[in-house]
Amino acid sequence: MENDPSIIGRNSPENGTGFSRRELLKGLTSAMVATTLLGFPFLSQAEKETATQDPVIFGQFYLVSQAITEHKNISEGSSAQIFNAFYRSQPDFPAQVSKLHALVKPGQAAKDLQEVAKQNGLGELVTSIVTAWYTGTVGHGTDSILISYKDALMYRPVSDGLIVPTYCGNGPLYFTAAPPAAAMPESMNADRFTNPSETNVVSKA
């Protein structure tokens, strides 16, 4: 049976790849996001999938987060967690992020972006994103979602002098790390426990 040229022509884009340019770009971007998130083993499958299934919006959210917090070195992993929490709780979140991203300009101060966002009806979105990054939570009250505690941005200004407030003496989950090496006292020197006969063996070779 010969191929029906009408079907082929209907399903194959003119670029000859079998995919539209839009699909190719989305697939490439999705793969790049997935590769980036491989370095964050603490992410759940749902968090990874949300970022990779809508990679353009995720990228816009990351850039918006950098602009509104004025922190360029924010974690892609934490960004994926916050993005997932918003994405699954607010149906219009992707559309709002795109609108907010369109307002971002190079070298723009966070306060200026916040003011422009308010003028465009996106003030609440900006506040919720900033709150998520600085407190490590998304939402309010019993519906809030904990994203991160020790990595919340509100602790960065004093990170060089104070540990994150916690019941643990040396910071959150410090007890899960291997204990530091302890110096042995002189009285416990290994030489004291060596068999004297072993040290006096003369080689007959």
Image: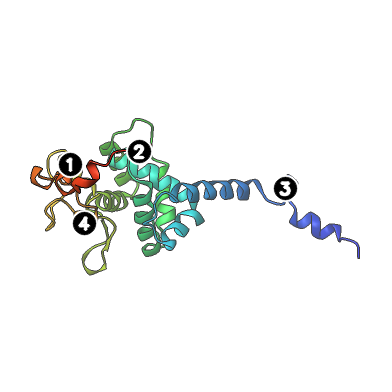
* Within-10-Å neighbours for mark 1: few <14, some 14–19, many 20+: few
Q: Which residue is mark 1?
A: 159
Residue at image x 40%, y 59%? 87
Q: Nearer the viewer, mark 2 or mark 1?
A: 2
Q: Could you give the CA–CA distance between mark 3 and mark 4, rounded to whole angstroms? A: 51 Å
Q: Which residue is mark 4?
A: 173
Across and down, in percent, residue 171 comes to 16, 51
Residue 100 in view: no
Indicate the amino acid at tag 2: Lys
Left or right: residue 12 compared with residue 94: right
Q: Which residue is mark 3?
A: 17
Across and down, in percent, residue 90 comes to 37, 62
Q: Nearer the viewer, mark 4 or mark 1?
A: 4
Q: Which residue is mark 2?
A: 204
Which circle's residue, 4 or 1, is located before the other in the chain?
1
The answer to whether residue 98 is above or below residue 85 is above
Across and down, in percent, residue 137 comes to 26, 57
Q: Nearer the viewer, mark 3 or mark 4?
A: 4
Find out whether the residues at labels 2 and 1 contact each other: C-beta distance under 8 Å: no
Indicate the amino acid at tag 1: Ser
Which circle's residue, 2 or 4, is located before the other in the chain?
4
The answer to whether residue 19 is above or below residue 87 is above
Indicate the amino acid at tag 4: Leu
Which circle's residue, 3 or 4, is located before the other in the chain?
3
* Within-10-Å neighbours for mark 2: few <14, some 14–19, many 20+: few
Question: Which numbered tag is attached to residue 58?
Answer: none
Which circle's residue, 2 or 1, is located before the other in the chain?
1
Is label 2 in a helix, a strand or a loop?
loop
Which circle's residue, 3 or 2, is located before the other in the chain?
3
Which circle's residue, 3 or 1, is located before the other in the chain?
3
